[in-house]
Image (cartoon, rainbow, N blue to C red):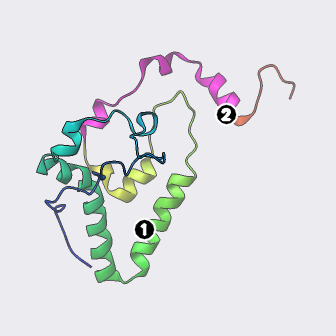
Amino acid sequence: MSFRIVPSAHASSSAAAAGADSHSQFKVHDTMRNGMHTVRSTVMPGHPLEAHLENWDLTQQQLKLDMARSVYGLHQPLRIQMEQHLVNKHVKRIPVLKQSNLAQDILTGKDSTIDFEDFLGDSDPSMFLLDVHGAAERTLGMTRGAPL
């Protein structure tokens, strides 16, 4: 159990050996599965800050779970993880409305913070032009004009 506040300075081991990502017997890079292969991506490691930013949320979540375990016992982190799994599993929303998961935000502690996603989200303006009631009826399996 380590109480790490900041992610480690070492970059994650996402760089694979040459040919390790291939699926053929000749060890040729599979562009369709793994994207374009560039020499720069294999030779130059990422910036040290990049590894910090990629692992920041995971490290903070692990710190909270470790602290809850040391204070309250083993049941508390298990309960938190179970609640997060249930919240993520049973999310139902209408496809044309803005995506929001308030329960997940409360469990992760993001309900009291304002990030750039809160006001500069990647919402597609064409989604709001759709018929909300029609989308709800399709989601719930109802059809228009059906007798009651």
Residue 66 appears in which quarter of the rendering? bottom left
Give yes or no for residue 73 being in the magenta stretch. Answer: no
Around disc 2, counting alpha carbons within 10 Å, would you say few (fewer than 14), some (14 to 19), or many (20 or more)?
A: some
The residue tagged with tag 2: helix, strand or loop? helix
Q: Which residue is rendered at x = 55% and y = 54% of the image?
A: 89
**Place of residue 63 in the rendered image (x, y in percent of width and height, measured from the top left):** 26, 68
Q: Quadrant of the C terminus?
A: top right
Q: Nearer the viewer, residue 42 or 144?
A: 42
Q: Which residue is mark 2?
A: 139
Residue 119 lies in the magenta stretch: yes
Question: In the rendered structure, which amino acid carries the disc numbered 1?
Answer: Ile
Residue shown at the point (48%, 20%) measured from the top left:
128
**Which range is magenta?**
115-138
Of 42 and 58, nearer the camera is: 42
26 on left or right of 148? left
Residue 70 at x, y percent in the picture? 29, 82
The residue under the point 47% across, 17% down is 126
Identified at 30% across, 67% down, the residue is 62
3D distance between C-alphas at marks 1 and 2? 30 Å
Q: Residue furthest front?
A: 26
Q: Which residue is mark 1?
A: 80
Quadrant where the N terminus lies? bottom left
Callout 2 amino acid = Thr
* Disc on the earlier residue, 1 or 2: 1
